[in-house]
Amino acid sequence: MIEAAWGSNPRFSDGVSFRFMRSEGQSFPRQRCLVPASEFHVRNGDRTFRVTLDGGNFFYLAALWEPAMGDWPVSYRIVTVDANPEVMRYQERHGAIIHRRQVMQWLDLTVPETALLVTPPANSFVIEEIVRQPVLL
């Protein structure tokens, strides 16, 4: 496990650091990695929501790493899929979920990408609003 920056080197994309990459129509034969997670967040206007797997298990997000270049460190981008029905109420896409049993399939390319980079079925997630508590002075 290493620490890496989230987002591509902006020097090669007109000053923009891309943090995500669509899965559709793509092949990822090299530089696959995983981002361990227990949740991800989605936003809808000023509201933020925590998304966890139903059952509370941790998971991984499928990602691709890029080597360090110049002063930019090793970095990664998360591979996305169409959002499942629960998340679709808040945004159109989310990171591709890799379950613990699928880790080596993603890393070793033993299962086709199309079998791993899929939209999770309905009722896969629990979504809770993150309510910010006011700071009392």
Image (cartoon, rainbow, N blue to C red):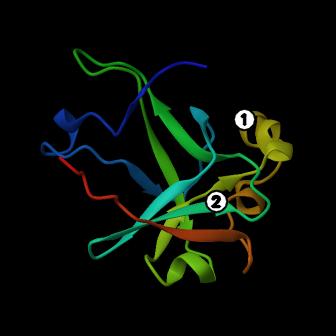
Callout 1 amino acid: Leu
Which residue is drawn at the image coordinates 36% and 48% (left, top)? 19
Q: Is residue 96 left or right of residue 130?
A: right
Front position in the image: 134 or 33: 134
Vertical arrangement, residue 104 with respect to residue 113, above or below = above
Decide if residue 23 is in sight here: no
Which residue is drawn at the image coordinates 68% and 69% (left, top)? 125
Vertical arrangement, residue 121 with respect to residue 39, above or below = below
Question: In the rendered image, which quarter is residue 46 located in?
Answer: bottom left
Residue that carries the numbered disc 2 in the rendered image: 52
The local crowd at label 2, few if under 14, some if 14 to 19, many if 20 or more residues have their Cα within 10 Å, is many
Residue that carries the numbered disc 1 in the rendered image: 107
Q: Earlier in the sequence, mark 2 or mark 1?
A: 2
Callout 2 amino acid: Thr
Question: Looking at the picture, how far across and down is residue 90, in whole percent?
Answer: 44, 78
Q: Closer to the observer: label 2 or label 1?
A: 2
Vertical arrangement, residue 61 with respect to residue 64, above or below = below
Using the image, tell me which numbered label, if any, was put on residue 25: none
Question: Looking at the picture, how far across and down is residue 78, in whole percent?
Answer: 49, 48
Question: Looking at the picture, how far across and down is residue 98, in whole percent?
Answer: 71, 50
The local crowd at label 1, few if under 14, some if 14 to 19, many if 20 or more residues have their Cα within 10 Å, is some
Secondary element at image label 1: helix
Image quarter in which the N terminus is found: top right
Q: Is residue 126 left or right of residue 87?
A: right
Mark 2 vs mark 1, CA separation in Å: 23 Å
Which residue is drawn at the image coordinates 34% and 40% (left, top)? 7
Question: Looking at the picture, how far across and down is residue 89, in whole percent?
Answer: 49, 84
State the residue lying farthest toward the top: 70
State the residue lying farthest toward the left: 14
Vertical arrangement, residue 116 with respect to residue 108, above or below = below
Decide if residue 106 is in sight here: yes
